[in-house]
Image (cartoon, rainbow, N blue to C red):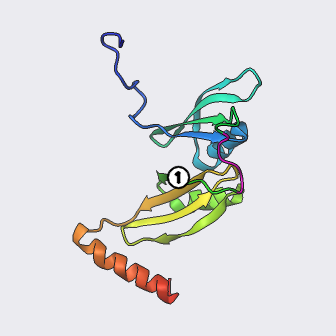
Amino acid sequence: MAMPNVKPVPERYRSLTPNLVCQNAAAAIDFYKRVFGATEIERFPGPDGKVMHAELKIGDSIIFVNDSMSKLAPGAAAGTSNPMYLHLYVPDADTIFNRALSAGARVDMPLQNMFWGDRYGKFTDPFGQQWGIATHIEDVAPEDLPRRQQEFFAKAASGRQ
């Protein structure tokens, strides 16, 4: 039962917080600090010294990171594809994207100006986590999106992208 006057979502959180399970959480945390300028809020080691729970702030958002703790939930591994990815808005997508590549990330989708108004690209970090990096560069009217989408895919199909 909830205590009176206690909020159901703690003060610094939103309703949804991604939790990244990694094979080497300590190295992943260092990567996120170096690439995204993440601030480490807290880190709790497990009995085996692995990261049982860590909390990072990237921009105005919180993520959790921990080591895989069992064979039932092995987490992402380097060189594998994860069925979900994190979409991160940043002031300068090119700088972050290039910093990630320099730190060992692999390009999944090169940065480009997209029909919906973002400069956007995707990479997989050395720990198997996929990231979509974006900077919003243009406000596009909803009625213009279908035409722009069609033009974008027509260019891509013709190889002019």
Marks counted in the figure total 1
87 with respect to 5 (left or right): right
Q: Is 69 situated above or below 161?
A: above
Q: Is 11 situated above or below 93?
A: above
| Residue with the mark numbered 1 | 84
Q: Position of residue 142 (x, y in %)?
A: 24, 67
49 with respect to 74 (left or right): right
Q: Position of residue 59 (x, y in %)?
A: 48, 43
Mark 1 residue type: Met
* Residue at 29%, 75% in the rendered image: 146
64 with respect to 134 (left or right): right
Q: Which residues are magenta?
A: 74-79
Q: Quadrant of the N terminus?
A: top left
Q: Position of residue 93 (x, y in %)?
A: 52, 60
Q: Is 3 situated above or below 65?
A: above
Does the magenta portion include 71?
Answer: no
* Residue at 48%, 52% in the rendered image: 88
Q: Quadrant of residue 97?
A: bottom right
Category of crowding for the residue at label 1, using alpha-carbon neighbours closer than 10 angstroms: few (below 14), some (14–19), many (at least 20) = few
Q: Is 13 situated above or below 29?
A: above
Q: Residue furthest front?
A: 72
* Residue at 73%, 29% in the rendered image: 50
Observer-nearest of 15 and 135: 15
Observer-nearest of 141 and 74: 74
22 with respect to 37 (left or right): right
Q: Judging from the image, what secondary structure is the residue with disc 1 in?
A: loop
Does the magenta portion include 75?
Answer: yes
Q: Residue furthest right?
A: 48
* Residue at 38%, 34% in the rendered image: 15
- Please name the predominant secondary structure of the magenta segment in the image: loop
Q: Position of residue 44 (x, y in %)?
A: 65, 23
